Amino acid sequence: MNDFLSEAASADLTRTPAWQALGAHHTHVRAQHLRELFAQDPQRGERLTAEAAGWYLDYSKQRVTDETLRLLLALAEQCGLPARIAAMFRGDAINTTEHRAALHTALRAPEGTQILVDGIDVVPEVHAVLRRMAAFADAVRSGAWRGHSGKRIRNIVNIGIGGSDLGPVMAYEALRHYSQRDLCCRFVSNVDATALAEATRDLDAAETLFIVCSKTFTTLETLTNAHAARAWCVAQLGDEAAVARHFVAVSTNAEGVAKFGIAPKNMFEFWDWVGGRYSMDSAIGLSLMVAIGPEQFRDMLAGFHAMDQHFQSAPLAQNLPVLIGLLAVWNTNFLGAQTQAVLPYAQYLSRFPAYLQQLTMESNGKHMTLDGARVGYATSPIVWGEPGTNGQHSFYQLLHQGTPIVPCDFIGFCQTLNPLAPDASGSDSQHNLLMANCFAQTEALAFGRTLQQVLAGGADPAVAPHRSFEGNRPSSTLLAERLTPHSLGALVALYEHSVFTQGVVWNIDSFDQWGVELGKVLAGTTAKELAALDAPQLAHDSSTNALMQRYRKLRKE
Ligand code: F6P
């Protein structure tokens, strides 16, 4: 049996005492409405809250009672969550299928902390790379780092995909307010040539720096785009030697980077104990550091670390990532929710749902337990979302009156970074409007509007049923004072640890991603067949064969 599993966790989870107790409890509370829960306890909205690292969590609009929470916390204890948290921070090889530690927390550990991997303290290495990144970022920002022809760098193009793209682009968009505005950052991920072509079409290669990010440095999309970018750069500048001033790499694979033609001094390393989707605070965040500067980047790391410390030390009942993780288990496994919406009321967080999709679904989209049995319960919900208020005018109809239950996480800030319409009291009326919508949505989802209320309002009785809202739709709200590098770091760490909490309960490996392999292997064979000039016999299924034949016929030779 795996060392990290308590005996109870390794047994079929659904037959364990804590799970059974939750199941029995659910049959008692399933019919309870949030209207009743709030009416019974006037303090509910203040009581079911928790706070850490600048974030206030209100989970009172989740469909839980004190007993639900007690039972969920008992489930966490039964699954050995405190021991698993300690094991993660200690650097144990908790990624069991890849025999590795999952030590993203070491990336933001302050200097002087000791974290051993195979007997070696990794914290000094982390800080050595951070210093190299800072020196490089400062040089680009100040203009000391020049392009091949002596021109100043004005454009940064990050080439990477998955964790080597989603984190950097999300954080760049989120912290754009803090960025040096005479530097333009773009992100190329898709192997569709359109991505690179559109990202570079108006750029001068002499002023452009490519940061090639790939943990493995073998990823098809990234290497294809990096080679194409290199050809574009060399063609514009007319000299192979230009690569040295216009390309840097971030990777764990020094050999692969050297083979591409990037010198070791232009490579920023990270380590195999950092998962791709947990890597935005490693050197993978180099483009972000160039944009916002080393000081702001360190502030972001401090935010991550503050949430790490909270996760490590706060009692489970007041622990934000634990609460969010356990609520996801309740919603998924007992209320039967299949999806989770993430709704930031902040335009700067427009890419946050996309970032969370990889973090959550690549981590917990698993069907095998740590000890190799098929799970007998649902695991990761499908995560999706859009910033508010945009979503209100597209899919919120379904959130309010559709048939599925969609638990929602609302995220907002008390202060705007762009006060366009300050009012007499000093607050910003446009921001007030934004947040009024956020709060109103949580209220409408929870309490709805009964048929009686609609009729009392004078509605046509024939239409009244269409205009009534059942309510009882669960949501949490996360509120911080202001979007800063620190609050962003804490928010990301909050979700990282909530994903881990869910994975511990579900007894799955949240740090591997074997499920992406099959598609990659099949695409390799298919690509060779599409490229072959002599049209080899196709031996796929009839659908794939027909699609490929049609493509071959219609493509431009
Ligand atoms: O294919 C999935 C994946 O391995 C992700 O886990 C990872 O973030 C992404 O590809 C990119 O990988 P790399 O950084 O090695 O290019």
Image (tube, rainbow, N blue to C red):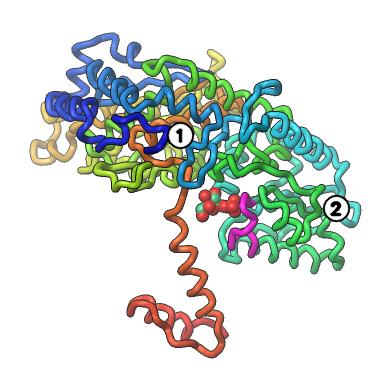
- The circle drawn on residue 344 is 1
Q: Nearer the viewer, residue 386 or 515?
A: 515
- The circle drawn on residue 147 is 2
- The circle drawn on residue 434 is none
Q: Going by the picture, which residue comes out furthest to the right? A: 150
Quadrant in which residue 348 is drawn: top right
Image coords of residue 518 (percent x, y) = 44, 62
**Sequence-earlier tag: 1 or 2:** 2
Q: Secondary structure at mark 2?
A: loop
At 57% from the left and 34% from the top, the residue drawn is 104
The span shown in magenta is: 214-224
Q: Secondary structure at mark 1?
A: strand
Q: Is residue 220 magenta?
A: yes
Q: Is residue 434 visible?
A: no
Q: Distance of mark 1 from mark 2, alpha carbons?
A: 38 Å
Image coords of residue 258 (percent x, y) = 76, 57
Please name the amino acid that badge 2 sits on. Gly
Badge 2 local density, few (<14 within 10 Å), some, or many (20+)?
Answer: many
Give the side of residue 222 with respect to residue 541, left or right.
right
Tell me the quarter of the image containing the C terminus: bottom right
Please name the amino acid that badge 1 sits on. Pro
Image coords of residue 166 (percent x, y) = 55, 46
Q: Nearer the viewer, residue 475 or 3?
A: 3
Q: Is residue 208 magenta?
A: no
Tell me the quarter of the image containing the N terminus: top left
Q: Going by the picture, which residue comes out furthest to the bottom? A: 534
Q: Is residue 415 above or below residue 119?
A: above
At 61% from the left and 34% from the top, the residue drawn is 117
